[in-house]
Image: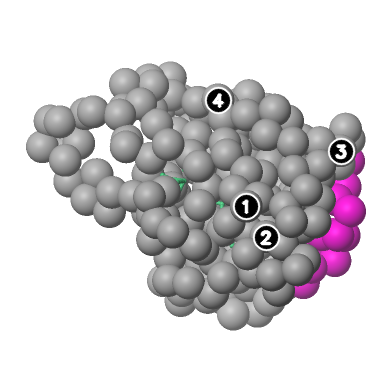
Amino acid sequence: MLCGLNIFQNVKINSTVQIYNKIAGKYARSFNGSPEERSIILEFIKDHTPFKGISIEEVFENLESLVEMGIDGVETSRGTLAFSMFDMCRGGVPSKEMSKIMPKPAQAMTNIALKLNYPEKKFAFTEAYNRLPGKKLKEVLNDCPLILVGGMRGFPLMDQIVTNGEADFISLCRPLIREPLILKKWSQGNTNEPACVNCNKCLAGLAHHMVLQCREKKKF
Ligand SMILES: Cc1cc2nc3c(=O)[nH]c(=O)nc-3n(C[C@H](O)[C@H](O)[C@H](O)COP(=O)(O)O)c2cc1C
Ligand code: SF4
């Protein structure tokens, strides 16, 4: 079973542990854990994931318990789609595109409200933005693999992070939305930086119930 650890950066001591039900559902049968073990872990996560998050200390306590329960890996993340989506997806805040889900008369106000609530400066993109929390998690995880996600871009840095033992796996989201074949390119020796510019318009597309694809140059 895989487990995602979401850390809220904007609420000083808050963070939360979140299970990715979809991943768990997809892979649970191929792991050693019995269905009973799986439901115990899911219950644990549910009981320990208050909406407002928990303290960093509690994260580590929970993580120790989860490792003892036999989870197969932990993926770092940050925030949640519902609570702090741009903490999770650092970069642009497509407030104009998102405001268009509202009826026309409400769009301008929504745009302003989004700009105020999600100031771009606060969510500026930096490469490997979960690297430091990942290092801390690694201390608790022992042999349990850590999957690092969040602004993983340059191939040399990813390689270095795995070679250093800071993470066991690297996870990519937006680079793959933009270039689904990027891993193939890298495996063939072309290790160019991903073309994704972190504008988050693909995320705005989801708010419109659009198909998930790169929407950087698309009209909303
Ligand atoms: C369109 C989109 C949808 C996402 N949906 C989820 C989600 O449902 N749950 C979640 O934990 N993270 C979600 N994420 C966050 C990603 O899993 C990932 O943590 C984040 O994009 C940072 O990785 P990246 O820099 O490789 O894109 C989503 C990201 C994007 C762009
Ligand atoms: S819309 Fe395209 S460029 Fe913008 S963040 Fe999404 S994948 Fe990257």
- Residue with the mark numbered 3: 11
Label 1 crowd bin: few (<14), some (14–19), many (20+), radius 10 Å: some
Label 1 SS = helix
Mark before the other along the chain sequence, 2 or 3: 3
**Which amino acid does the dot numbered 4 rest on?**
Thr
For the question of whether residue 37 can be seen, the reply is no
- Amino acid at the residue labelled 1: Lys
Q: Earlier in the sequence, mark 3 or mark 1?
A: 3
For the residue with label 3, is its CB less than 8 Å from the closest atom of ligand 1? no
Q: Is residue 4 above or below residue 193?
A: below
Mark closer to the observer (3, 1)? 1
Left or right placement of residue 114 versus residue 123 in this view: right
Disc 2 and disc 1 in contact, CB within 8 angstroms: yes
Q: Is disc 2 in contact with disc 3, using a CB cutoff of under 8 Å? A: no
Residue 121: name its quadrant: top right
User: Mark 2, mark 3: which one is toward the viewer?
Assistant: 2
Residue 125 to residue 103: above or below: above
Q: Residue at x 32, y 21 (%)?
A: 156
> Residue 58, which numbered label?
none
Q: Is 49 a magenta residue?
A: yes
Mark 4 residue's CB less than 8 Å from ligand 1: no
Q: Position of residue 60 (x, y in %)?
A: 78, 39
Color theme of the render:
one colour
Give the label on residue 126, or none: 4
State the residue in front, 152 or 132: 152
Region rendered in magenta: 43-57
Give residue 116's quadrant in the image: top right
